[in-house]
Image (cartoon, rainbow, N blue to C red):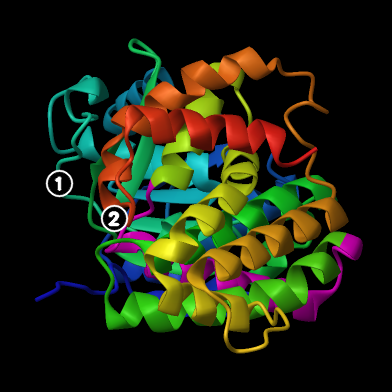
């Protein structure tokens, strides 16, 4: 048996942000907090403010979110929301901002600090206020998943908590201002979600269908979106892909690729999507022999030329090579090119080995394999 579901209603379309105020009001809220990061294009949160005002609502604006959703920022956000009596949290931004909004909602229903709920083995925490999420990247999928990944800076660990969402508003126009590099690594994050969700040891039919469609869309549109950020058709397709990839991993969960990416984030402070991109070829190479039928479907969705009689090992290698070729085309730099020492990969491997995510891998992640994965990330992509 398997349990699966879509975690939030979705409003998708160009210009959908204009519906924000009406949707907030529809939940019975009177004073939403708009949670953004300081680098967000001002026109984006101005659209949100205009929509909220048009609905006759007061609002609070919080623009202090930071990468990897550190617990200090979540505590600050929750404290302000309580003081201002916010009754709805609206996250507008990339994955870290959306995760900050999710986690901060806990503090409106439960006593802080937030670290009490961000644990090595994630728990589900009920919240009393609606959470509405508007992604400004086509990568995170966080707008339609239960998980909030947060930085336990007191322990130098990235752990998670599960909360329920009220609504996701996906407006591809919000991604038009995303620069090429961010477009590249957030798109690779979505690809990692799809491939890891499909190769998880906890699959389901919904994640399977969504993951394959996400891979098709990414293979056809990520290069286009990086080359011309104003290509609205490509942005729409990538927004759909990121959303589908979020569904693809939400119940099956990601596995050792994301665990390795978390290790890079903790050790080297690389952006989450960069770490996911760099780990993805190793995921494909190792999972091919373990789940050859699924790897064949992944390769077909990526439109990789196949003979039809490839072994699982060969399918894994071909898909890994395709990922590396895509990364080169969209200019994802290797760890060596970024100036990182290979010796750091031993520290990265510790997260790969001990993360709860690795429990969902189709291959058993031993100490030796964690080291092989980490050094492979460094050595196999230059």
Left or right for 208, reference 372: left
Of labels 2 and 1, earlier in sequence is 1
Identify the image quadrant of residue 197.
bottom left
* The quarter of the displayed image where residue 105 is located: top left
Q: Separation of disc 2 and disc 1 at Cα?
A: 9 Å
Most extreme residue toward the bottom is 308
Q: Quadrant of residue 253?
A: bottom left
The part of the chain drawn in magenta is 227-255
Q: Nearer the viewer, residue 120 or 147?
A: 120
Q: Which mark is residue 124?
A: 1
Q: Quadrant of the N terminus?
A: bottom left
**In the visual, does 297 lie left or right of 176?**
left
Viewer-side residue, 100 vs 346: 346
Whether residue 176 appears in magenta in the rendering, the answer is no
Where disc 2 sits, the SS reads: loop
Q: Can residue 380 be seen here? A: yes
The numbered dot on residue 146 is 2
Q: Which residue is pictured at 57% across the width and 44% down the height?
A: 279
Q: Is residue 254 magenta?
A: yes
Identity of the residue drawn at 90% across and 63% down: 227
Neighbours of disc 1 within 10 Å: few (<14), some (14-19), many (20+): few
Location of residue 55 with respect to 185 vertically, above or below: below
User: Is 261 placed left or right of 9 in the picture?
Assistant: right
**Residue 150 locus on image (x, y percent):** 38, 32
128 left or right, relative to 156: left
For the residues labelled 2 and 1, say whether their Cβ atoms are less than 8 Å apart.
yes
């Amino acid at each position: 048996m398997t349990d699966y579901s879509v975690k939030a209603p979705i409003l998708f379309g160009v210009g959908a942000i204009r519906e924000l105020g009406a949707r907030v009001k529809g939940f019975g809220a009177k004073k939403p907090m708009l949670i953004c990061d300081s680098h967000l294009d001002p026109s984006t949160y101005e659209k949100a403010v205009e929509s909220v005002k048009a609905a006759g609502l007061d609002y609070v604006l919080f623009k202090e979110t930071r990468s990897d959703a550190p617990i200090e920022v979540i505590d600050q956000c929750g404290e302000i929301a309580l003081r201002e009596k916010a009754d709805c949290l609206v996250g507008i931004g990339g994955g870290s901002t959306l995760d900050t909004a999710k986690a901060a909602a806990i503090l409106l229903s439960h006593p802080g600090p937030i670290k009490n709920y961000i644990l090595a083995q994630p728990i589900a925490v009920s919240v009393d206020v609606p959470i509405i999420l508007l992604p400004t990247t086509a990568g995170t999928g966080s707008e339609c998943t239960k998980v909030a990944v947060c930085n336990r800076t007191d322990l130098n660990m990235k752990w998670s908590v599960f909360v329920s969402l009220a609504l996701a508003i996906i407006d591809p126009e919000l991604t038009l201002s995303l620069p090429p590099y961010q477009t590249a690594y957030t798109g690779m994050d979505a690809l990692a979600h799809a491939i890891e969700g499909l190769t998880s040891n906890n699959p389901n039919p919904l994640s399977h269908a969504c993951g394959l469609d996400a891979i098709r869309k990414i293979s056809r549109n990520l290069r286009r979106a990086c080359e011309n950020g104003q290509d609205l058709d490509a942005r729409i397709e990538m927004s759909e892909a990121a959303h589908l990839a979020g569904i693809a991993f939400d119940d099956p969960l990601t596995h050792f690729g994301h665990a390795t990416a978390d290790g890079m984030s903790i050790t080297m402070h690389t952006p989450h999507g960069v770490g996911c991109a760099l780990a993805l070829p190793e995921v494909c190479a190792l999972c091919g022999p373990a789940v050859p039928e699924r790897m064949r479907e992944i390769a077909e969705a990526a439109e990789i030329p196949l003979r039809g009689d490839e072994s699982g090992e060969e399918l894994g290698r071909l898909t890994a090579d395709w990922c590396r070729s895509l990364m080169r085309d969209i200019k994802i730099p290797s760890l060596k090119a970024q100036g990182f020492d290979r010796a750091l990969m031993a520290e990265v491997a510790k997260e790969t080995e001990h993360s709860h995510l690795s429990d969902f891998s189709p291959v058993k992640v031993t100490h030796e394999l964690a080291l092989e994965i980490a050094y492979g990330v460094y050595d196999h992509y230059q």
